[in-house]
Image: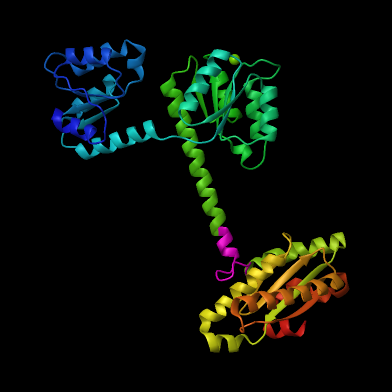
Amino acid sequence: MRNVFASVLAARNVDVVQVESGCQALIALEREDVDLACIALELGDMHAADLLQCNRANQRGNVLPFVAITSNRDKTHVDAALAAGFSECFHKSRLADFETYVDTWLGTLSRKLSGNVLLIEDSVATAQFCTQLMNAMGLVVDSVPSAELAIDALSHRRFTLVVTDFMLSGLQTGLDVIRFLRSRDGRPGRTPILALSGNDNMSRRIEILRAGANDYVQKPVLPEELEVRLRNLITLAELFDRLEAQHEMVKDMAQRDRLTGLFNRHRLEELMPDLIANAHKTGAGLSLVVLDLDHFKQINDAYGHAGGDQVLIAVAAALRGTSRPQDIAVRYGGEELLLLLPGIDLPRASLGAERLRRHIENSTRTAFRSLAASASLRWRPTNVLIRCFAAPMLLCTKRSTLGAIR
Ligand SMILES: [Mg+2]
């Protein structure tokens, strides 16, 4: 049985020290720098639980994971091992479970993290100790001794994680830092916070967690505990960020035309009420340029729909290349594209539209040589002068009505 479990570790390039008895195990645990102990519950010379208790007497033994291995299927036997303090208990037939356990354990040992941490700690020794530990995990650390300096840093920069002591130099405490950070909007307000404190006061711990700290570590800090809590917080924050990015991507996909990447009609309907309201409120113009590609049917007939798609992609790229960040380019349907120009009045829109038409003609001529798709452009401002063309009316209309407003 021993060889089978040892081979699981050796196959993962873990150095394995094998011993045959409880006494030999105690000597090895004393002499070797051990990261994981796998003990058979059925030892010849002592109970495995006694071995565990002997080793727990030193501080290192308190944090070392002890895994029990047994050939006994009796549930009470396993329960007794867990109650004695073993981290896990595997039956010899559950080799696959042991392999999964080892893979997870190795993963947390070796996975380098990335990110920057703001450490708020007034004790130089603790700050140095935590900084070294976090640097070894792959994290970049900025250390400040007071809440005032921390709040200043948090006002100007974003951090992956904040680790704060409670009692600090200066007038404010770690609680002020936590409250400041949680009062911020968006992602900065969600920065994970790990609190440290030398005072084992339950009501204070509860207050710190209530203020928004995600986790808490008691001083003196055990490196293994700090490391695993930091890993958990950062992993959770990374998962949340990934989920948020995916959500944004799905939202963006729902708002865009798949072929051209321009906004779709659905997004236009969402944006128009605010754009029109804003134009009325500020008195600034809001112009609408309607692009309808000429001879598009002939392009499709001559080059197939793939050719037509290429023309649309090139025109959309030209549209994006010539518009300002605040302009809104939309594929309204088929070969009809729209460009909304907030803050632009009719004369400026008409000049811009003619420039755009020439640009499209040139850029598509370059791309398709003789296949230049020239665009017919019409423009109308949806400002106070012609309110009847306000967007809700436009958007409810079919193509024929869209033609009528040109
Ligand atoms: Mg302190």
Vertical relation: 333 (above or below) 121:
below
- State whether residue 265 appears in this view: no
> Residue 34: x and y, percent?
29, 20
Vertical relation: 98 (above or below) 369:
above
Q: Is residue 40 left or right of residue 356?
A: left
Residue 227 image-quadrant placement:
top left
Residue pictured at 59% horizontal, 88% vertical: 297
Vertical relation: 260 (above or below) 26:
below
> Residue 386: x and y, percent?
85, 75
Residue 78 image-quadrant placement:
top left
Towards the viewer: 126 or 100: 126
Residue pictured at 61% horizontal, 41% vertical: 187
| Residue 175 falls within the magenta-colored stretch | no
| Position of the C terminus by quadrant | bottom right
Towards the viewer: 347 or 401: 347
Please state the total of marks drawn on the protein image: 0
| Residue 255 falls within the magenta-colored stretch | yes
Name the residue furthest left. Answer: 44
Residue 106 image-quadrant placement:
top left
Image region (quadrant) for ligand 1: top right
| Residue range (magenta) | 251-264
